[in-house]
Image: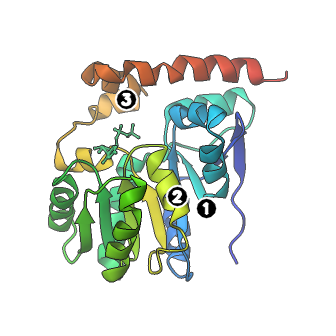
Amino acid sequence: MMQPVRTVNILGVPIHAVTTEETLALVDAYMQEPHLHQLATVNPEFVMTAQTDAAFRAVLHSADLCLPDGIGLLYAARWLHTPLPQRVPGSDLIYDLAERCARHGWRLFLLGAAPGVAAAAGTVLQARYPGLVIAGSYAGSPAPAENDAIVARINAVSADMLFVAYGAPNQDKWIARNRAALSTVRVAIGVGGALDFVTGKAIRAPKQVQMVHLEWLYRLLREPWRWRRMLALPRFVLKVVFSRSS
Ligand code: UDP
């Protein structure tokens, strides 16, 4: 049995206080256990969605790891006197996970994103990590009507690891409701727009922008249609500021 990981509570959502290195060590251990482990890449938008979406909140509570993906969570944790060690961005982590899949022969399935993107991402990852086995890739959709056929597709190719790119909260709910039915998957992670970044369909902020913690602003400027969703950020800041008791 593994040691439980310390969590930090941010507005009712448990965030695991892990580094990337610790995350990868946990994944190695999860892969040895004969059931699915769910990872979520949490940012302030997730936390705000969880305020009103009880089903999503329950999914985050039952996930094995809620990774601190967004920088806003680190600021919030520090403000609440329960600091988190570092950001663990899903968009970086997927490369480390793919590398481990290649090294250990774990079969990776890529689900979601626009048609063709998952397959293209698989090709990019295979070029980068020779020997990587892409068990399958499929766009599909999180619609209930497609659910069982997608599960059957993933089971049929005995996938060991699964990336789901349906955006939050759908991707995380999708994994949670199929936990038991996905009979071969050991680690499943909701990756948001990460497959779009892998293929170059979307461009991540330059490293300098990431380093000064303004990746969210870069994304807002590049994808201005997200502004309504990103109103979650100032609402998050206000809620966290006023939630501190002392
Ligand atoms: N997406 C999808 N089906 C859906 C909704 C979204 O495949 O029904 C994909 C979309 O193409 C993108 C990914 O989900 O690749 C994540 O979308 P978004 O960037 O909105 O998510 P975030 O990274 O903000 O969680």
Q: Indicate which disc, 1 or 3, sits on the residue closer to the N terminus.
A: 1
What's the mark number on residue 39? 2
Quadrant position of the N terminus in the picture? bottom right
Residue 17 visible to the viewer: no
Residue for point 38% across, 79% down: 155
Question: CB under 8 Å between callouts 3 and 2?
Answer: no
Q: How is the image coloured?
A: rainbow
Residue type (three-letter) at the residue carrying disc 1: Asp
Between 246 and 136, the one lying in front of the other is 136
Q: Indicate which disc, 1 or 2, sits on the residue closer to the N terminus.
A: 2
Q: Element at badge 1?
A: loop
Q: Indicate which disc, 3 or 2, sits on the residue closer to the N terminus.
A: 2
Mark 2 nearby-residue class (10 Å; few <14, some 14–19, many ≥20): many
Q: Element at badge 2?
A: strand
Instruction: Report whether 189 appears left or right of 44.
Output: left
Residue type (three-letter) at the residue carrying disc 2: Leu
Residue for point 35% across, 60% down: 146
Q: Can you identify the residue that label 3 sits on?
A: 215
Quadrant position of the C terminus in the picture? top right
Residue type (three-letter) at the residue carrying disc 3: Glu
Residue for point 15% across, 57% down: 120
| Image spot of residue 39 (x, y percent) | 52, 58
Q: Can you identify the residue that label 1 sits on?
A: 64
